[in-house]
Amino acid sequence: MSTNFPDDDPLAARLRDALTSEAAMVTPSDDGLTNIRAGIDEGSRRPWWKHPAAPALAAAVVLGVMAGGIAVFAGGGDDGGDNVVATQPSTSSVPESSGPEPSDPPMSVSQTPIPVEGDVYVYYVMDDGQGPRLYREQHSEMTAGNTPNSGLMSLFSSRPKDPDYRSLWPSENPIDYGVDGSIATVDLSAWPALGSQFESLAVQELVYTVTANDPSVKKVRLLVNGKAPQSGHSDWSQPVARAPMMDVQGWIWLLAPAGGATVSSPVTISGYGTAFEGTISWEVRQDGQKVAEGHTQGGANGEFGEFSDTVDLDPGTYEIRAFESSAEDGSPIHVDTKTFTVE
């Protein structure tokens, strides 16, 4: 057996010289050769581990392993290089995952709050001082199940809770409703007789109501007695999607206290909207006199978001106003109001 050591390794060279010297001093004799042959014959008749040469063989194996280990660890030399130990890749099996790793819940792309189970969302119209816009109310469902049909039934048959709101659709207008994939079809018996601006807002009032109650619906096809509407202003023959929120939706809504609600103090003020730098102002009035005011943070600069605050009030009936202060003169703009009672 030959052992190869790196030529430039000092320790390996010393080991090689020592082994060579020891080998040179070994002189076999005739008696020794005879004993070896006799041992071979005897070894064929007994187990290998009882052979007299077994301990020496084991020692040689150990010495070889030690020498190899020394050569590996000393292989870097004295040049200051990194010592690297080569290893074989692990062959131990790694159990496969039983399924994909759980991921974070998907972020909703809709900026409109999800409907509360058992109720429906209905959109109405109000002029906020800068023009007519859409505002949402939460109503009890009108039919079995929380369906878009329920929202449309409320739109056509229920009065708004807030007296400042109104629907642009005639209340006697029956509907036929169906969904195919992401498109809902609403078949109406009549079309509102409105100018171009209000007609477009009426369409968005219906589209926003449908999609608020069924997020799977992305567009609404409008029919009148089974045919495309005869508008005189716009072509409504194709399915209609929601218009951008900033174009049609009220910039500031009050959600609580709800109009006509009876609440306890401290009163929770909450809403939804957008304002310059997100600053939503509010004030509470009683008998025409301001009794409390404050401001809180909502959505900023076109991004809609929720806002909230609290106020301590004595028992009585109040009006609350939420608004943005005009950058020009500080006057209230995009105002929404609610009347409520503290018990």
Image (cartoon, helix red, strand yellow):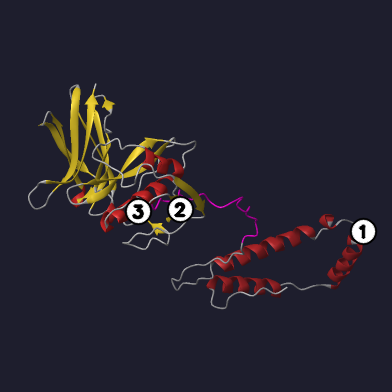
Disc 1 to disc 3, C-alpha distance: 105 Å
* Residue at the image position 47 percent from the left and 55 percent from the top: 226
Question: Which corner quadrant of the image does residue 295 belong to?
Answer: top left
Question: Which corner quadrant of the image does residue 253 belong to?
Answer: top left
Any mark on residue 45, and which? 1
Q: In this rendering, would 34 be left or right of 196? A: right
Q: Earlier in the sequence, mark 2 or mark 1?
A: 1
Residue 139 vertical position relative to residue 14 in the rendered view, above or below = above
Q: Nearer the viewer, residue 103 or 11?
A: 103
Crowd around label 2: few <14 · some 14–19 · many ≥20 (10 Å): some
Q: For the residues labelled 2 and 1, say whether their Cβ atoms are less than 8 Å apart.
A: no
Residue that badge 3 annotates:
203
Residue 22 vertical position relative to residue 203 in the rendered view, above or below = below
Q: Amino acid at mark 1?
A: Arg
Residue range highlighted in magenta: 90-110
Residue 167 within the magenta-colored segment of the rendering: no
Residue that badge 2 annotates:
225
